[in-house]
Amino acid sequence: MENFSKRNIFKVPENYFEQLPDQILEKKKPKALHYYLSGMAAAAVVVIGFFMFQGNETITTSNNYQVDLNEEVEYYIESGVWNVEDVLSLADNPNELLDNITEEEWSNQTWVDEGLLENEIFY
């Protein structure tokens, strides 16, 4: 080992360390742009998917809530907890509700003779 010279056998090119940061940044720039664009595309997909699923769930939740509410109201009426006055007091427009119920009831009636006298129909 003592026979080997102690001089530096490696030679560094001129301005190597001054140009090194610029060379590294040039190599990284296309990858950074690629990652940035990929990230933006992924974020757009997530946002669009969120709003699509959120909108569908809101409609479904609203419909399920109305169905559950109708079933609960029918249960209270059938079990005798609520009477006619209670149901009408909950309505925004009780006269319209009564008209709808009356129309539905009368439309389901089957008449034997269309020529029934007015005094034969029981109110």
Image (tube, rainbow, N blue to C red):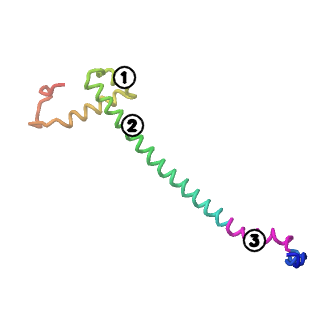
- What amino acid is at disc 3? Glu
| Relative image position of residue 74 (x, y in whole percent) | 29, 29
Residue 17: image quadrant is: bottom right
Q: Label 3: state its secondary structure.
A: helix
Q: What stretch is highlighted in magenta?
A: 16-32
Q: Name the residue under label 2.
A: 65
Q: Is residue 40 above or below residue 64?
A: below
Does the magenta stretch mainly form a helix, a strand or a loop?
Answer: helix
Give the mark nearest the N terminus, 2 or 3: 3
Along the line of sight, which residue is nearer the eye, 11 or 112? 11
- In the image, taking residue 89 as reference, residue 101 lies left or right, namely left
- In the image, taking residue 11 as reference, residue 119 lies left or right, namely left
Picture quarter with the N terminus: bottom right
Callout 2: few (<14), some (14-19), or many (20+) C-alpha neighbours within 10 Å?
few
Q: Which residue is drawn at 62% across and 59% down?
A: 40
Q: In this view, does 35 lie above or below 84?
A: below
Give the mark nearest the N terminus, 2 or 1: 2
Residue 73: image quadrant is: top left
- What amino acid is at disc 1? Ser
Q: Do the residues labelled 1 and 3 touch (CB within 8 Å)?
A: no
Residue 120 located within the stretch drawn in magenta: no
Along the line of sight, which residue is nearer the eye, 3 or 56? 3
Give the mark nearest the N terminus, 1 or 3: 3
Q: Residue at x 57, y 57 (%)?
A: 44
Q: Name the residue under label 3.
A: 26
Q: Name the residue under label 1.
A: 89
Q: Residue at x 12, y 37 (%)?
A: 114
Q: Label 2: state its secondary structure.
A: helix
